[in-house]
Image (cartoon, rainbow, N blue to C red):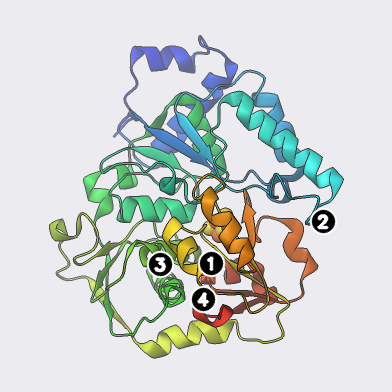
Amino acid sequence: MSLFLSRKEEHILDGEEGEVLQKCYRLLVRLGEAFGADRLIPIKSAHLSGISYKSIGEPGLDFLEDISQEARFKVKTTINPCGMDLRRWRKLGVGEEFAQKQLRILRALRRMGATMTLTCTPYYLSAPTRGDHLSWAESSAVCYVNSVLGARTNREGALSALASAIAGVTPNFGIHKEEGRKPELLVKIKAELRSVSDYSALGFKVGREAGDRIPFFKGLKGGKEEMKALAASLATTGAVPMFHAEGLTPDWEKQDTIGLEKIEIESSDIRKVYEEFEGEGFEAAFIGCPHLSERELRELCHSRPRVRTFVCTARNLAPSLVRPLRKSGFEVLHDTCLVVSPLCEKYEKLAVDSSKAAYYLKSKAVLKRREELIK
Ligand code: F3S
């Protein structure tokens, strides 16, 4: 099937509306052709990842500054955490040179029209609705909005999401279509899941088994925060774009699971994930991968940290909770997380309650249940 282009889109491809838009369309058309898309479809929003100077360095900074001279975002465009807390970076010991480069990246994004959300859970600030087509590039958020909210976005890379933000369209294939949302693996939960961290460990295990297949969970219980933890780790060890869960996710009743490969998850499978990141003697802890919801922040207000503990969330989510959290002894970090910030380099061992964070922090990480990190 070839990709249909309207006359207007052909003109854009011919460069009649500027070089940057032409390049964005070229990239999106090429991507669409590679994956059998039938056309380009309008999107409601884009979400950009890869905006920390720690991740993209000098080439990324140059590229963004360069295109920001001409490019403007056509749709609402939110952005992932960057490399530092914009108000507290000096106090936290982030170097001046790093900070200035990070600020230049953010200025370039702002010039293009980005909403400065600086969070990997932008859906807590403004949630997409069921059926919305999006172009999002944070894998944990992609898996969450597709599965829990019923929105539609492929797992975009930093470049394709940027091109879509500028063009306002995305190629119509994969998760955007009904047939791309069908389950391909049946997962029966026999494990006892006691903590939000157990859901993260569950996703870590199932992501490995699933690869890029869409799992259908049977016997799973839990609320939105548990689904967030599950989505994040499914998308870490696997390239899982979404999941269905019996009784929990919006489209589960429409799905046919007859004849699917089936796996069972026991409590021992969950235990083994913690064993992969065993260790003691951590100097600090990091809670909030993905960024915490208001409900999670409220719960933390009633506890105290065991060691120096960084809690990451979106700056504009619940500003009134920052003071009580600090009073309880937590270090609240906005705009960033310990994975994308150079802050983590200060620690030899860091306790985390998320297997996604453990995966990225590698030998530095000790994986614990959230309840073990607080008292
Ligand atoms: Fe978010 Fe950082 Fe985890 S961007 S998903 S808190 S690695």
Mark 1 surroundings within 10 Å by alpha-carbon count, few (fewer than 14), some (14 through 19), many (20 or more): many
**Looking at the image, which residue is at 68% across and 77% down?**
307
**Looking at the image, which residue is at 46% across and 15% down?**
12
Side of 110 relative to 199 (left or right): right
**Discs 3, 1 touching: Cβ within 8 Å:** no
- Asked if residue 160 can be seen in this view, the reply is no
Which residue is under mark 3?
A: 230
Which sits earlier in the primary sequence, circle 2 or circle 4?
A: 2
Which residue is under mark 4?
A: 370
- Gap between marks 2 and 1 measured at Cα: 25 Å
Label 2 is placed on what type of residue?
Gly
- Element under disc 2: loop
Which sits earlier in the primary sequence, circle 3 or circle 1?
A: 3
Which residue is under mark 1?
A: 356
**Looking at the image, which residue is at 51% across and 9% down?**
16
Q: Which of 107 and 153 is in front in this view?
A: 107
Which residue is under mark 2?
A: 93
Mark in the foreground, 1 or 4: 4
Q: Quadrant of the N terminus?
A: top left
Side of 184 relative to 94 (left or right): left
Label 4 is placed on what type of residue?
Arg
Q: Where is residue 372 in the image (x, y as percent from the top left)?
A: 54, 82
- Element under disc 1: helix
Ligand 1 within 8 Å of the CB at mark 4: no
Q: Kindly identify which numbered label has been placed on residue 118.
A: none
Label 3 is placed on what type of residue?
Leu
Which sits earlier in the primary sequence, circle 3 or circle 2?
A: 2
